[in-house]
Image (tube, rainbow, N blue to C red):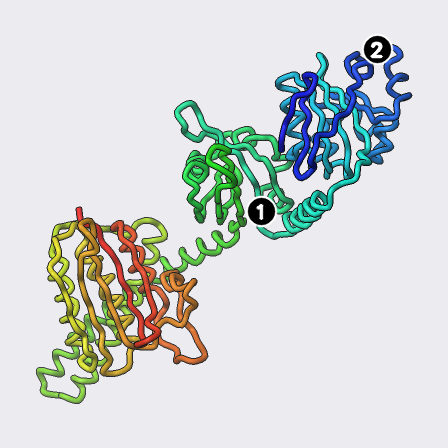
Amino acid sequence: MRQQLIDNTALFYKDPIPVPFLFPRYPEKIHYPLAEGTSYRYESTAEGIFTLDKNWRCVYANRNFLRLLGKESQDLVGNQIWKVFPDLEASALGDIYRRSMQDGMSRILVDYIPAFLGWYRVSITPTAEGIDTTVQHHSKSVPFEKLSVYTSEQKYRTLFNSIDEGFCLVEVLFDAYNHPYDYRFLETNEAFRQQTDIENAVGRTMREIAPLHENHWFEIYGNVALTGESIRFENHAEQLHRWYEVYAFRMGTAGQRQVAILFKDITERKKTEHVKDDFISTASHELNTPLTGIKAYTQLLARELQKAGDKKNTTLAQKLNHHVNRMANLINNLLDTSKITKGALSFIKEHFDINDLVAERVNEFRLLNQYYQIVLDTTPVKPILADRQRIGQALGNLITNAIKYSPPTGKITVSTSDVDAKQLKISVEDHGVGVSVPAASLNKVFDRFFRVSSANMPTYPGMGLGLYITAQIIKYHGGTITVDNKPDSGGAVFSFTLPYE
């Protein structure tokens, strides 16, 4: 939008209109208060005229204005202009109104005004009491490009208000130290109101609406506004009593400090997850106690049968013990999952050689899985500071996963290497069926309870917790975990990084 000063009046017009439209002002109609006879003079003019006070309330509207917009006097007089025309506040005309109220400068706008449902010339003149406005239909022929822009805008507006997700455009507010402390709503859709219960948000700040709204919301959006880095996250809004899944991205330049926010109310989902977490925690604890006793008696039985020389029953007891260990591992995974969701998974860090740990774990799996070729490929790396037991658990989960999806006698390679001076990488590569998930969704394999399913592959045992726990352990240590399919040779490569001190 361009601006030009003409006779101390700001004239606004939008591209692609090639020249400014110059219209006479009406000081004899506008600059006087509503004294005796004023109403008659306003009623006798051909233009639509209305007057606002300092609080944006309409104090007068002549018959022509009411006729132009299809309104009754009681619809306007005594009401705030923003409530009568909700779409006006976030529009170009709304912006001009606010600026004129602030700086006292008269302005003229020629444009299609959605709130008024037509093309108008609007003349705005500040007065001591507020703002006087003259409105008349603009009959000038409109360029085709202008109509195309409006048609596109109408399509956008229809889509904007039809989507299920809440949407808002905000201006992030910063203090003198460039620290975000609030944000002002510039635009919202219908789903915004439904998913927040916030009415008439446009023009108001979040602190006005929810004074105790958590600071982390402002910090997240402030970072998006300044850096331009989009973010996706889940968070709880205490004062709104809701959980939200949010995607935020910057609109415009860093100087505009505007952030577009697409969000979904996931409160019910979180409640369901909470119930499920409580059940998992209770069930896993209740199952763990009797299973500990079963495991002890199974081991004792195997030893006694072996002493008695009963080879057949000793073998059966050892198989029983193997399945008890599998059950114990599943229950331990449930317990760890419960602790992770509560932030209670314990870690004890120490310095150790990662190659020693990798060799130990590989040798353990070689003894238990003699039909598989488990290859160790390590390079010298520096010691790290981490929880040795938890890193061993994470590595064990990846090797178990590789064995599960590999054919008998399949080859599995476990390797270590330096990424750079700041971090090392551990990889587990197999030549099995790979991960039958679209490339864009590969990281879903690290979600809780996620299991790969395909009509072209058999069903494998498991609860979908091992990779989730592994990812959480690596995340705690400040590392990253990835998975890649190998389309040429088959199989998959799971890798995770760990930082040096």
**Residue 371 visible in image:** yes
Residue drawn where x is 36% and y is 61% of the image:
446
The correct choice, above or below, for 68 with respect to 413 in the image is: above
Give the label on residue 166, or none. 1
Residue drawn where x is 65% and y is 51% of the image:
159
Q: How many marks?
A: 2
Residue drawn where x is 33% and y is 75% of the image:
488
x%, y% of residue 178? 41, 28
At label 2, the amino acid type is Ala
N-term-proximal mark, 1 vs 2: 2
The correct choice, above or below, for 460 with respect to 240 in the image is: below
Of residues 211 and 98, the one drawn nearer to the viewer in this rendering: 98
Residue drawn where x is 27% and y is 49% of the image:
478
Query: Left of 222 or right of it: where is 11?
Result: right
Q: Secondary structure at mark 2?
A: loop
Query: What residue does disc 2 label?
Result: 35
User: In which quadrant of the rendered image does the N terminus lie?
Assistant: top right
